Amino acid sequence: MSGFAALVTGVGLITSAGTGVEPNWEKVLAGEPTASSLPELDGLPVTIACRVPDFSPQDLGHGSWRWDRFTQFAVMAAREALEHAGLAPGDWADGSRVAVIIGSGAGGTATLEAQHRVLLEEGPTAVSPLTLPMGLVNMAAGQVAIDISANGPCLAPCTACAAGASALGIGRELLRQGVADVVVAGGAEAPITPLYVSSFARMRALSKHSDNPATASRPFDAGRDGFVLGEGAGILVLESEEHAAARGARPLARLTGYGASSDAHHVTSPHPEGRGAELAMRAALDDAGLTGQDVDYVNAHGTSTPLNDVTEAAVISRLLGNEVAVSSTKGVTGHPLGAAGAIEAAYCALALRDGLIPPTAGLSEPDPRIQVDLVRGAARHGPVRAAMSNSFGFGGQNATLVFTL
């Protein structure tokens, strides 16, 4: 048990539910699905996804055209998070005490795919010199660090769908070690591309309900058949208690526990008994100094895939009991891969702030094998004093976060 809390003083969000924290939270609380048919996916095995609406990268200013879409998301969310925290880019005497950690699973895949087509069709001399600076996974973290004049550690965890949660856990550790006073951490992803859609479809990981997008993402439902691909970014400002107190900042929540593990079982399928997930969840609880009975809400990984949902629910039952409130916000946002853990961490912080638990959109007929208390239909009023967020990635990489008031 570490007993250390990283204070969440700011949040920035951009997802298919909207740009900005409050529009996102409003749609998530309402349980409004955002999946839609996308013309650019015509001819692919799956033609639906959760696309960020009305996104204008030019709002980011001069030079943003040199960034891949996932980096644009990260910069936009980071700017909002800093504003939400009452900070401005460069608003520190010593930039070496400010760290940036932004995870991603796919990085600039849209750029890489587009330039690969250029290579094949026009030859090597036509390939853009910006291909690698736009495509590398660490470029979201690097560009945010440039944008906010942060000279401290700049890291980019690539733990697949656990990347955003990994970033937050590592950020808390930097604060605990005294390496930084402020950490801008989260995840960013823009994977709605022909290659990613086709690859996930060939794996039979995506929902095939392209004829009815609104009900395609249905975590924990008996009729679930796969996830809907999403995109976006979630960025949180984490501060030490001393730094936040010195400037009179009031936290939304405290990040008090982090656990990480590996299934060491299979590159895509969860361990049938959820052993890796259980290790991460136990570690996070121990780190926070809590028992399973202390947790009021679990924002589940809940991808809407047949194996994940039933396995995760069984682990929640074992560790936390069947009375804890559980929901998956992927019914609204789809699955934004490496950004998911950070986006859902933000939703946990907002649940603590408002005493409201979001419902699971798309859930109409719960899988009878799942015994936990699934929140569905409408948001549920708290109290929410402790919330857990689970993120599980390909490769068997698991990360769990615990937030408290």
Image: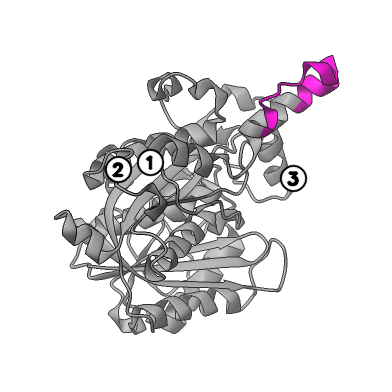
Labels 1 & 3 near each other (Cβ < 8 A): no
Residue 123 seen in this snapshot: yes
Left or right, residue 327 beside residue 315: left
Label 2 vs 3, first from the N-terminus:
2
Q: Residue at x 60, y 58 (%)?
A: 159
Tag 3: amino acid: Arg
The crowding category of the residue bearing disc 3, from other C-alpha atoms within 10 Å (few below 14, some 14 to 19, many at least 20), is: few
- Residue identifier under label 1: 78
Labels 2 & 1 near each other (Cβ < 8 A): yes
Pinpoint residue 385: horizontal percent, then vertical percent. 22, 70
In the structure shown, which secondary structural element does the residue marked by tag 2 occupy? helix
| Residue 82 disc label | 2
Tag 2: amino acid: Leu
The crowding category of the residue bearing disc 1, from other C-alpha atoms within 10 Å (few below 14, some 14 to 19, many at least 20), is: many
| Residue 202 disc label | 3
Q: Which residues are magenta?
A: 116-132
Left or right, residue 72 beside residue 245: right
Relative to 304, say whether 137 is above or below: above
In magenta stretch: residue 131: yes
In the structure shown, which secondary structural element does the residue marked by tag 3 occupy? helix
Relative to 275, say whether 123 is above or below: above
